[in-house]
Image (cartoon, rainbow, N blue to C red):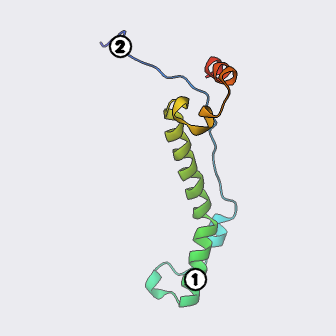
Amino acid sequence: METPSDNDEIMVKNYVVACVDVLGQEERLRGFPLLIHNMSPEDKDGLTKAIKETYGKVSMVRRLFKQFLKDDEQPPENHSWYQSFPEEQKFEFQKIS
């Protein structure tokens, strides 16, 4: 059985988890033909708009969250907002992060 070694690193951070449920998504997408080739141009325009109003929101939140996690992995010293802090604030920031 494996045991943790001194080289194992565990990163502990606070995160917010969100479950996004787009209300009315099912109703908004219902009524369109199942196959795109059976759709009229008006149906295709309506479907495109419905997808942007429903899945588009979920996709945007997912993209923003991924970007947040990517940015959070970088040390704060690499961020321009951190560089703009006075030394005293940098010291306080380091104590809480």
- As drawn, the label of residue 45 is 1
- Give the amino acid type for the residue marked by disc 2 in the picture: Asn
- Does residue 30 appear in this view? no
- The extreme left residue here reads 1
In front here: 87 or 5? Answer: 87
- As drawn, the label of residue 7 is 2
Residue 38, x across and y down, in percent: 47, 87
The residue depicted at 62 percent of the width and 60 percent of the height is 57
- Give the amino acid type for the residue marked by disc 1 in the picture: Asp
Residue 90, x across and y down, in percent: 64, 24
Quarter occupied by residue 15: top right
Q: Is residue 88 left or right of residue 73?
A: right
- How far apart marks 2 and 1 lie (CA) works out to 56 Å
Residue 71, x across and y down, in percent: 52, 39
- If you read the primary sequence from the N terminus, does the residue marked by circle 2 or circle 1 appear first? 2
Q: Is residue 8 above or below residue 59?
A: above
Q: Is residue 57 above or below residue 45?
A: above
Q: Quadrant of the N terminus?
A: top left
Residue 79, x across and y down, in percent: 55, 36
The residue depicted at 61 percent of the width and 28 percent of the height is 14
Helix, strand or loop at label 2? It is: loop
- Does residue 47 appear in this view? yes
